[in-house]
Amino acid sequence: MLATPMHLAHHVLALPIQSANCLTAIGRQVSRLAFLLLSTLVLASVIGCGATPPAYFRHNMVESTKQRLNSDQERQVATVLLAMFGTPDHPVALAETGLDESKLHLAAGPVRSDIVGRKNGLYREHCAHCHGITGDGLGPTAAFLNPYPRDYRPGVFKFKSTERADKPTQADLVRILHNGIAGTSMPSFALLSETKIEALAEYVKYLTIRGETELALIRAFFELDDDAKGTLPETREFLVEETLAPIAAKWQAAPAAAIPVPPIPTNIDLVASIAKGRELFYGDKANCVKCHGVTGLGDGQANDYDDWNKVIVEADKEIRSGTEQASQASTAGMSPEQLADHRLQLVWLEKFHQVLDGDALTPRTIPPRNLRQGIYRGGRRPLDLYYRIYAGINGAPMPAAKGTVPPEDIWHIVNYVRSLPYEFDGLLGADRPMVAPDRF
Amino acid sequence: MTQPDPHPIGFCASSFWPHVVACLLVGVTAVLLCFGAMVTTYDAAMAVPDWPATYGHNMFLYPLADWFYGPWDLFLEHGHRLLGAAAGLLTMALVGVAWWGEQRRLVRGLVAAAFLLVVVQGVLGGARVLLDDRTIAKVHACTGPLFFAVTIAIATLTSRWQGNATSQPSDSLALRRLSALLLVSAYVQLVAGAQLRHLDAAIDPLTFRMLVVLHVAGAALVTGLSMAVCACAWGQQFMPALSSRCVAAGEERSSRVSGATPAIWATVILLLVLCQIALGAGAWIVSWGIPAGWFGDSLVAWIPTEPIVARSVQSAAIVTGHVVVGMLILGVSVVLAIASGSLEGLEDSFGQRSEAHA
């Protein structure tokens, strides 16, 4: 009888009985360990099955605590915002905002189809898991991302066709939604219909105007006189005309703030243009090399924060210095009023610390872009690069070249930057000619 | 004293029709689950706001052209409902043929469980729509795989192959235990995955992080168990001395014959698990982007990422594929558990109960 491969393997691999018993014992131990792990898993899964929390707009606790608002004042802000903007399921847009309510209703609320089969709840379907229901960039997945998702509430947008301090146009928001942002987790929604993308852009504006209004209301407490007794005036003049209208007006003025773009110089060939751009890149005027590095790999100055993270870093510093001062203060010689103030300060520091733990993400520095990857977050068109260089990037350390570099010359920098991913590797070596030795 | 049945969960001639109907049910349920997974991927559960009617029509009389050429979300949701109804009808047919043609209490019990589950699942599906509640959707997503597992168990137990080839339970206690654990783990992992799939944007970030850790830990557990089961099954195949009950030469031979099937199924599971890990990573990336928050800034600057196109066919296929492969792992785990004799204890308890009633 011929031996089958299994018989052969059996004879070759057969172990003594003692070893077999040992392996069986190990198998039992593995089973027990796995059973323990499984029990933990089952318990934890049940926790995940808890009731879905209702959607609500989160209060801006970081700014509110920083401005030392008490709970009554926080409630007052929330009430005013509810009256002016409604809820995540039922948004309201006053005429002064210039927002289209029909678009808002398409984007707001839970994901469901209406009676004609049109899908609503677009924001919660596509955006809220990162940007959060409130648009505060604190969605459940936010902590896993780098860079963090945008917090709309300060009203600052990076990639736009308008001057640095101005709001983006509707077309800018639509372009970002359509193309996504390369090098980040922001996807492209190119497969959504134009109507849906327009609705999402409108809802982003709604969340931004709401967030800016909230900030303005919180900061308004600081400017109240003694007669107000810590209460905001609930008048249309104050709430709408003085607070909301100026914010909305900036959004409505965005199309008029478009960056003027000169034509691409035609009296110079591309090679010469790139050479000139390189000169500017390493020169004193544009000084791109300071952050993007001598190699263009983004390895220059890299310890700065963007505006969103800077708020948290500064708050953290405030807590640290306050705690240090409080711990050094001696209560022995304090009057009752000073003692009460001291205790209030300790309570406030503790609250601020808790707020930062729960309502803010760990700050991250913003590394300058590696220009040799060919990935441009604000768009890869030459025009997009022109906008970035001309106006800088709002909210980021990238400064504006406007005023220091003539607009026509900015096109040369654009050409050089666009050539960097294809620049011959040998230029990165020791013989690299463009680095001025007196500068580095 | 009566001799114990040498084929406690074996095939009998009367299992033919239950087996045919069970196989049909498995097929319909597999397609049904794929549709269900697609419904979740496209967030299309509320594409039809009424239930059991579809936009006022009787579900079965909804115009075919409106369904087929209508919005994609409607196609998925209404198709899911029709397939659910088909699964319900087939389950009722299975109850009928099993009642008349199947004598084994374990199989009858499983058929009764399938019927109960399909009814509960239908009600849950309706409640999810009428109440527009994601928590119910999560429970609905957990009951579906359970029903699928039960249908596979019925189809396996009523098969001629199961009756003839592997009626001898595995001699290795470790293999039986590990197979049972793998089966339960695969299901619990689907439960954990359902929590992430039906993510509500209003969820607390800390809860989300806990769910992620849970799902990753579950993946590690299932991977570890599938490797252990594979090693154990092949070990039993080549080294029957591992079995404590294997003493006589005759028994050794029978053990080798019955051990081949668990080893093959265990290998299939291991391959599916490896595929599932890759799909899981892909599903995360196409849903929520590269989790670059885990890396340092210096590393992130070197990740060249082009934007992912949301709702593209590729991303939907990856996300849905992750769910479908999860179901396959569960299904094959059921077959492995039966082939390795993990259900022996269950069969005994059913038998003892029937004797007690008698």
Image: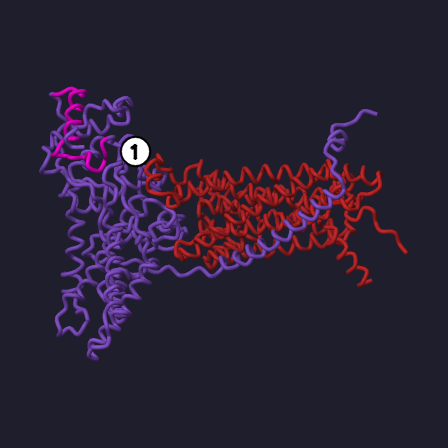
- Image quarter hosting the C terminus of chain A: top left
Chain depicted in red: B
Q: Is residue B67 magenta?
A: no
Front-most of residues A230 and A423 = A423
> Chain A appears what colour?
purple
Question: What is the x, y in percent for residue B288?
Answer: 40, 44
Q: Specify few, some or many for label 1: CA neighbours under 10 Å numbering under 14, 14-19, or 20 or more.
A: some
* Residue B305 appearing in the image: no
Q: Position of residue B165 (x, y in %)?
A: 77, 38
Chain ID, mark 1 = A
**Image quadrant containing the N terminus of chain A:** top right
Question: Which residue is the site of mark 1?
Answer: A375
User: In the figure, is residue A9 to the left or right of A237?
Assistant: right
Question: Which residue sits at x=69%, y=55%?
Answer: B112
State the image coordinates of residue B328 (x, y, percent, origin top left). 59, 42
Predominant SS along the magenta part:
helix
Q: Is residue A412 above or below residue A313?
A: above
Q: Residue furthest right?
A: B1
Depth order, front residue of B244/B198: B244
Q: Amino acid at mark 1?
A: Ile
In magenta, the rendered stretch is: A268-294
Look at the image and tell me whether residue B38 can be seen: yes
Q: Residue at image x 19%, y 71%?
A: A231
What secondary structure is marked by label 1? loop
Task: Say left or right for A318 vs A285.
Answer: right
